[in-house]
Every structure is written in structure tokens, then in C-alpha cells.
Image (cartoon, coloured by chain):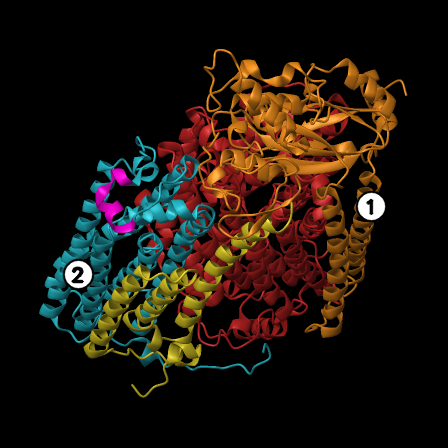
Amino acid sequence: MSQPNPHAAREPEHGEHEHHIVSPLVYLVIVGALLVCTALTVVASFIEMGVFNPIVAIAIAVFKATLVVLFFMHVKYSTKLTKLTVGCGLFTFIVLIGMTLADYISRAWGRW
Amino acid sequence: MSDSPAIIHDAPEADAHRAHPAWQRHHFETVEQQADTTNFAMWLFLLTEIMFFGGLFTAYLIFRNWYYPAFVAGSHQLNIWWGTANTGVLIVSSFTMAMGVWCAETRKKNGLVLCLILTFILGLGFLGIKTIEYSEKIEKHHVPGFHYSLQSFLDPASDPKIYKEYHDKPLGRDMAVHTELYFSLYFAMTGMHALHMIIGIAILSVMIFRARAGAYTTGHVTFVENFGLYWHFVDIVWIFLFPLLYLISRHANP
Amino acid sequence: MSSTLVLLPDQATARIPKVNYLTKENGILSWLLTGDHKRIAMLYLVSITFFFFIGGALAGLIRLELLTPQADLMANDTYNKVFSMHGIIMIFLFLVPSVPATIGNFVIPIMVGAKDLALPKINLLSWYLYVAGGCLVLWTMMNGGVDTGWTFTTPLSTHYLNTNVLSTGIAVFIAGFSSIFTGLNFIVTIHKMRAPGMTWFRLPLFVWSNYAASILMVLGTPVLAITLVLVALERTMGIGVFDPTKGGDPLLFQHLFWFYSHPAVYIMILPGMGVISEVISTFSRKRVFGYTAVAFSSVAIAVFGFFVWEHHMFIMGVSNYSTLVFSLLTMLVAVPSAIKIFNWTFTLYKGSITFETPMLYAFGFMGLFTIGGLTGVFLGSTGTDIHLTETYFIVAHFHFVMVGGMLMAFLSGIHFWWPKMTGRMYPEKISQLAALITFIGFNLTFFPQFILGTLGMPRRYASYPPEFQILNVFSTAGATVLGVGYLLPILYLTWSLKYGEIAGNNPWQATGLEWQTQSPPLTENFVETPIMDHEAYDYEWLEKQMAKEVTSVG
Amino acid sequence: MSHISPILWQFLIKWLTNFQLYPPEASKIAPQMDALYFFMVLVSLVGLTIVILLITSFSILYSRNRHPVAVQIEGSTLLEATWTIIPLGLFLIMFVWGSLLYFRIYTPPANAMNIYVVGKQWMWKAEHPGGQHEINSLHVPTGRAVQLTLISQDVFHSFSIPAFRVKREAIPGRYTSVWFEATTPGTYHLFCTQYCGTNHSAMIGDIVVLTPDDFKKWLDSSTSGMSLAQNGERLFASLSCNACHNGRPDSRGPSLANVYGSKLALAGGGTATADEAYLRESILNPSQHVTEGYAPIMPTYQGQISEDGVISLVEYIKNLNSNYRVEQTLNTTDLLPEGAPSPGKAAPAAAPAATPGGKGMVKP
């Protein structure tokens, strides 16, 4: 296939795609990490940490989700477009939650 | 940007008439393009799913801030061990799914079938545990809208099993009624999640048969891959639901 | 106005190409099971036209009722049902799918040089979902309708009405997924299916604006879906999330609803803006002034569109501090629209302008959209919003944007691409007349409503104080004219299907890839994959191309 | 003119003579609102004229006949920057101006006269502090800041007075407020502008603006005997609020005298200002509003008091500046010969409303 592929000259996103096969070993490490994190978050919930309880719980959840997204869902090995898509979803999600909460939180600031 | 030099291709005729694999749809130029496209479409679909759950998460955060004691008391009604077990089950099922994708990529038919069956069983297991949890809620009349009972919150001692562990103080009636809101969100969120699981399992059951027929181990892995994305996404939702619903202040009241 | 661009082939010898997407297969099943984006576009065109006229008839009833100050034509509850159904049908079944699902579906794949949309089956599914949603709305209407208004405000919709809220909610939910799938399909197609050489900045602006709208569809619509699910659960089980008596918050509904429904107005208007870019450029034979600015302003509208939803809630008891943020962002989102208007205007500068029907509609769009956009600023500024919101001012504002803007753009686009879609021309003079009638009728209908609103007449009133009658009479009179303006196109366009003159490949001498193919196009659009070797709107390239053709033919 | 139909003729005459562009300006804020409004109209007209002029002149100058060959222009950064920055600047002016106005309208002055308004399907009920009730009408004096505290019993309503240029939604479950100062006596429209169900368009009424003297006369002629605060006092006793909120050293609830407007330290940490909304909330959802140092034992009164009742209680607590009469009421009930109604039970009969003239801790 020495002839130029017409699609190679489209976006770089077409060209750079080569199917990366993640080794099962990586999966095994990740699933181990996920299970350990689950145990950790359960343990953490039994410890009185005040405001840090939810923060720790969410931080661990975010970490776990990141592992799943990067490795199980192959985003680490994916094109920029996929990464951008994930980022875009996260961004809108945060806009929805953040901007709505902005109203609820600032309602308490004044007598309105 | 707009005045970049024109790229002119003289696509040779020979290239256009390469042999197409059977699974290549007519409107794609190459198999890679097709795989890329469907993969991207799947990601976009997952974006809509993120926003779909986003509405629920927003509601959850607001009411958790407003009615924190009710949320704590409601959360204590959930069985943390079932929840943890379910998290484990789902994570392992995600792992078997990922392995399934790997098997498909490396064209291991039997491995793929095994992985899909395992995923299927784990998925059912998750739903089974969820059913046990739900039935517990139904017994205690903790299903909002259906003879919802405040007893466990007005008088925690009446629920000795949970009281023993957490020594919850009784809630005022005005706060206790808000536990219904907690359970509304609990059922809405886990229910939506379970609905996604059911859809996933239904697709899986078809996939197992097709995988046995060798449909995914010929090099055309897009479908398995995309289903894997969906399955992992459902897993991620649970990864967040678990701490949000089960792990609100599990430490016993002093 | 004597000379026009229309370059029809010699009518004595002209033929519609024997093989095209319309004649490729025959029989009703070949339509109902088609994967061809052009056929699906035609299916969409027929179905949204159907719903447009139902919604239009309801609008006529509203205007008739408002002819007199008393609720004499209809009782209050009937009136409420009529305006609710009008809103639901027009927004979810007409405006949202109008340009994207018909014109966009038809031309986007051709514009980017693809054989079809990336996911043809999903495209067909999206039409079926649309039809299912539409049928459910019709069923609802026959079963007594719904009187929530299109906004489904809780707790009214959840606890205080015993009309068919549930079935309407499900219908909108389904129609929502139809729009998600359309948007998803467009994004994937634009990213992955572009022909060789078709870089992002060679895309026609129509593609850009549909891309921006698609992003909004994909990210916004699911939030509406979950909101409707919660409303349904509230109605059936009483889960209490939006119910103040159970500790829920009805304002949360407003937040979630407008998180979709504000971007939804950009979903409606952005594709229309794309049409205008194409039409203005074609009929002034000139590249769009500041292509990059227009392209990016679409994306900017899409992005900012997600940050402004609270301006629908300024008087609803939201935090005053957050109104500051949302009002400021609303002002920012108005700027890209201003940029577009001026860029279109300056596209005319030193052009070579002709005044065919699409161009007349486009001029109408520019005037009316400018008014609609500027009055939006009145409502985006928190202070004046207090007085003007929930009155006829807001009704006039969004009808200027949606009907004056979007519907004008839709008609402009339909007239522009009609020769491509059907291979035939419509009678030019009568269509110009229709454009004129529409413009006059529109202004007569909706301009008095600005004054009514300023005077304080509330929206959704079946009866009103008698001093408002005169302006309402003007408005109803205008609506009659407007109705004629909308009926004419359906008559002469249908007529043209059989009797119209053969249009030829490129009657307007436009530059888009879709005009370089036969009319109507082939099923897979191109004989061979096109290779884009020139910029968008490159009229010099087109001239050379035509000269080449002439020499080779001659 | 004989060929014009007389009906049409009358119609035109009526239109020409009655033509208005904006409603009467009957409040202090109205001219300010109109100033911004007409500024915006001016900007819009200028903008629209520019666009229309440009389109028309370009259409004439560069029509195919006059200008057969188009000149291709890429764009002009300078021009584009101009029409980005100028509208942006204008919009920002409107934003700042509008926000100032918004804050003014929704921030009542401290000395405003407070009138409660309850919205329900499909009527407005206004309650004056003196106990005067009105349905679908509101009497207000000129020259005095009037604050409306709005709440809805069912769905969203919206209290709109076009002549005052103010509008505020009445929300179920929460107080909202708006204020105005009427300037011109007269009768003006009151509309419900938020769609609220079947008879939405019947939820209208009159705003009657009176001179201060007339207003006083009206107040005197339409009093129902008891002021809101007096009503509240009776409720306070009948619900046995005084069993705990009595200001005794050993009382189980905090003293409510002078509580209105004060900063309270809450049990869970943090502080809150005791405004109307806070008072209402702490009656209905007490366990979220426990004052520092007290046990969360107060029962909720959700479902037991109507919104009108809550308003009376709030008004009573607002005006309570000593616990003297609370004590008195308690003593009376304690000393009742039957002895049956203990402080924990309701004792409406013993409510002190019959002695309004006493050592009036309740402002009339």
C-alpha cells in the first residue's frame, strides 16, 4: 500500500490513529488499584474527618473514574479528539453544577 | 488559517478499489475511518449520558447541602457492605469487559466469549444485590410516594440493627420528612443506573451469541469496543454514586 | 431587479437526470427504510411542514381569541391548551428540527464531500423518534391536550393540572432524543467524513453553524430529558424533588429546564444563521466578509449559550449576585450575533447583488433578527427585565428571533436549496411576492406586541383589559396576512414539483460542493470522492470552472 | 371621507387619541426605568438604522446592474474589531445600568411599610399590618416606601404592576420581596404574569394609590378589628409557643423579644439574620434553624398553620419587644380555675386578644 492514502492528508486525527492494544497486565494493575481504592474510601468514611469526609470520598471517586477513563476506556492511548470530547463533557457537567450551585450558595449572602 | 495552501490529491483509481471487508459500510472510504467514526459517535453519546446524570447530580448536591442530617440518616439506612460488594462486582465486571475487548483485538474467540459471559454474570449479580437492597427498602417503607414511613428517623432506636452501629439521634419531624427526598434521589439515581445496566446486559446477551459465532474476532472490534465504553461509563457512574449515596458520614455519632 | 443570477438550462432540452436519489428506488418501503440522508431530509421536510401548519393553525386560534378583550371564542382552559400546544409543537416539533433536520440533513454531507451522514441508521432512527414524539403530541391533543405551557413549570405541571402532562412529557422526551441523534450525527460527520482537502476553514459557514448547534443539542438536550423524567416521577410517584411541600425546590426545575431551553434557542437560530451566510454570499457573489469571525462567532454563541440560562429567572427569587453574573454573560452572548449581522452586511459591500427569493428572505431575516436581538438585550439587562419579562414584550422578542429570524431563514434556505432538492424551480415572481407578504404580515403581527408588552399586557392571557384591544386587533390582522404568506410557498412549491422549470446543476452559480453535483443528486452524492482544492466561497474558482466547462462542451 | 366605514373610522380615531407607548409613571422607580428603557430604544433604533441604511445603500450601489463584477474582500480586522467593541461597550453600559436598577427595586429600604401578599389560584390576598385584608386589590399611600412580602400557597404567581415598573414572582414555600414608592394617586392594573393555570387571566386586580390622608381614612374604614400582630399573638398562645418562648431563665426556647433583625448564632455553627424569611422557616422547619445553646426539640408547624397564620406569627414576632405579655398570658393560663389547659396544651380561650389596650408590647 505504497500509494498515498487520501485520508492521511485529512486531519491529523485520522492519520495518527493506530489501534493501540493495552496489555492485560495493565488491566490487572488497574483493577487492583480500583479495588484498593474502594476499600480505602469505605475505610475513610468510618473515620471522623469533618468537612474532609466528602472531599476525600469525592477525591477517591475522581481518581478511580480517571483510572477507568484513561485505561479501561483507552483514552490515554486515544486521539486528541477523544480527549477533547471527554474534557468537553466534563466542562459542561461542571458548568451545569457549578453555575446552578452559584445561585443556591449566593442566595444566603444577602437578605434576598 | 483560511489561506493555507490547497492540498490537491490525485487519488489513484487503484486505491479506491481496494478490497473492502464485509463489515465496511458503503459510505465510508476505509475501515479505519469507519472505526474512528463509530468510536467518536460512541463518545458523543456518552457525553449526553454525562449530562443526563448531571441533572440528577445537581439535584443531589443541592438537597444534600440543604438537608444534610436527613441525608446522613437516610444514608445510614443503606447497607454499606452490599454497596461495597456491588462496587467490587461492577469494577471486576469492567475488568472482564476490558479483557473482552483485548480478546477481541487479539482475536481470541473463546476468551472473548468467556469474558462476555463473566461480564454478563457479574452484571446480573450487581442487579441481584440491588434487588436485595431495594426489597429491604420496600419492607421498611422507604420507597418515596408509597406509604413512606418516617419511623426509622423519628425513632432510630426502633431500628436496632442500624441504631447499634450509628446511634443516630432522632430527627425532628420537619427534617425527617426530608429523608423522603434522599430516598427519591437514591431511587432515581440508582434506578437510572440500573436501567443502564439492564440495557447493557440485554445487549451483552446478544453479543455472547454473536461472539460465539465469531462475529467480533475477525478484526472488526468496533462493536465490542464501543459496548466496552458504554459498560465502563456505567461503572464510572456507580463509582460516584457509591460514595455520594452510601458513604455520607458513616462514623458513629459520638 | 431586472437581471438575475438564475441560470436555467435550455428548457426545451433540459432533463432531470434519470438516476438520482429520488428515482433510485421506488415504493413506500424504499422511503421508510432508507438510509439516504437526502430521503430522510425529505421525510423530515414533509413531517415538520405538517406540524408547522398544525402549530400555525393553533396560532391563528390564539390571535382570533385575542381579537376581543373577553374570553369569548374560547374558555380560559381551552385557550391555555391552545397556546400550550402551539408552543410545544412549534418549538419541539418545528423549530428545533427545522433547518438542521431538513436542510442540514440534505446538504451537510454533500457540503463536506461525504457519501452520507456518518450514521445513516441512527439518522433514520432519529426521524422515527421524531414521528413517534409527534404522534404522541397529536394523540395528546385529541385526548384533551395539555395546558402547562411549553415550559412545564412546576409545581403547576406536577400537582395542579389534570391534563395530559405525562404523555406530552414523554413526547418531548422522545423528540429530544431525535434531536440528540441528529446533532450527534452531524458532529461525527463533520469531524470524520470530510473529503480530502476539506479543511475546517474551507467548510461552508452553514456547516460551522450547524456544528455549533449540534454541540448544544448533544450537551443540552439530555438535561431536558432528565428534567422531564423527574417531572414524570413527581407526577406518578410524588418523589418531591420539585415539590416545595416536601422540601424540594421548584426553582431547581427552572434551572434544569432552562439549562436546556436557553441553549435550545441557539439550537433553533444558529442553523438559520448558517443559511443566511450561504444565501448572502451567493447572491452578492462574494466571499463572506470575515469568514473566520463568522465561523468563530457561531462557536462562541454555542459556548456562551451554556452560561446564560438564569436570565429566564431574574424575577423568580434567584440570588441577586448570580443575576449579575448571568446578566453580564448574556450581554457577552449578544456580541457574536452583532458581529454576524455586520459581517453579513459588509458581505454586500462591493458585491454584485441580485434579489432572488432566498435573498429577499435573507434581507427580511437581517432586519427582523436585528430587532429581535436588540430587544433581547432589553431582557438581558436585569433592570428592564423586571418590567418587560412575562409580558407581550417577551412574546414579541422571541417571535422576532424565532419566526422573524429562524422561519425567514428556513424559508430562505428552502427556496435556496429547492432546485437542488427537487431539480426544479419555483415561479420566481410569486415567491418574491410571498416573501414580501411574509415580511409585512410579520411586522404587523408582532411589532404591536412590543408596545403591548411595554404597556404591561401579560402573556398567556385569554382575556385582557379593553385598552389593549386596538393593538391586538392590529396583531390579529397581521397574523392573517402572515398566514397567507406561509400558505403561498406550500402551494407553489408543491406545484413546482411537477410543473416547475428544470433547474440544472447550479442555477444560482453558488460555490458549495452541493452545487457542483447534479440536481437532484445521486444517492451517494458524488460519482467519485471530490477533492477540495479551493477555499469556501471562491467565486473566481467557480468562474474558471465554468469557463472550462464551456470550452470543453463547446 | 364618507367612503370610510364609520366603524373603521371610530376605530382609527380611538387608536390615534388613545395611543400610548408606555404605561403611566406612577412610582419613583418608573422614570428611572423608563430612562434606561428609552436609552435602549435609542441605541436599538440607531443600530437598526445603521443596518438598514447599509443594507439598502449596498443593495442599490452594488446591485448586479451597477456593479456586475464583485470585488472579493477577505475581511477587515479593524472593522470587525469596531463592531465587536462598540456593541460590547454599549451592552456593558446597559448591564451596569440595569443591574443598579435591579438592586434598587429588589432591595427594600429599612423603613418601608410592609404589606404581605399571598397568591393562590386565582387571586391575590393582601394583608396590611393593621389587619386590613384585600382580595385582588391593594391600597397604598403615596410618598411612602411600601415593601411587599410575597408568597404563594400553590404554584408560581407573579405580582406585576406595570405602572410602577415592578414585578416579582410569588413562590410557594419562600418569601420574596419587592418595594416601590407610589407617586401619583389613581387606580392601576395589577396582573399575575406567571402562567398559573386555568384562570390565570382572571388573576388581576387594582392597585389603588391614595394620598396619605385618604389612605389613613381607608385603613380606618376597612379594619377588621385585629391587627396582624394581634392575630399572631392569639396564634402564639393557642399553639403554645409561649410554653417555650417565654423569656424565662429556664425556658426551653430562645426569647423572641427583639429577635427580628438580629444576628443569631446557629447551633450548627454559622450565623443568620432573623428576617421574615428566617422567622417563617424556623416555624416550619425548626430543626434547620436551631439557635446556639438550645436543644432541637421544637416540633414543626408544617401543615398546621396556613400561610396567613404564618404571616400573623411573623408579624407578631417582628413587633415583639418584650416578653412581658408573653409572661402575662402564661400566668393567666396557669391560674385558670379549671386547671385543665396546661402550658403544653392549646388554650385559645385564654388568649389575651380581648385586652388589646393593655401594656401594649404589640404595636398596633
Q: Chain of mark 1?
A: D
Rendered location of residue D166, percent (x, y): 73, 37
Q: Label the yellow chain with its letter.
A: A
Q: Which residue is mark 2?
A: B119
- The residue at 34%/37% (across/down) is B154
Residue D10 found in image quarter = top right
Q: Nearer the viewer, residue C301 or C289?
A: C301
The relative height of residue C104 versus residue D292 in the rendered view (above or below) is below
- The residue at 11%/65% (across/down) is B114
> Dot 1 lies on which element?
helix
Q: Residue furthest bottom?
A: A2
Q: Magenta-highlighted stretch: main secondary structure?
A: helix
Q: Nearer the viewer, residue B41 or B131?
A: B131
Q: Which residues are magenta?
A: B157-166
Image quadrant holding the N terminus of chain B, namely bottom right
Apparent side of residue C527 relative to residue C509 in the rendered image (left or right): left
Does the magenta portion include C158?
no
> Dot 2 lies on which element?
helix
Apparent side of residue D113 relative to residue B59 in the rendered image (left or right): right
Apparent side of residue D206 relative to residue B237 in the rendered image (left or right): right
Rendered location of residue B96, percent (x, y): 18, 66
Q: Amino acid at mark 1?
A: Phe
**Labels 2 and 1 positioned on one and the same chain:** no
Q: Amino acid at mark 2?
A: Thr
Chain C rendering hue: red
Chain B rendering hue: cyan
Can I make out residue C12 in this image? no
Can I make out residue C491 in this image? yes
Q: Chain of mark 2?
A: B
Number of the label disc, if any, that sits on residue D38: 1
Q: Label the orange chain with its letter.
A: D
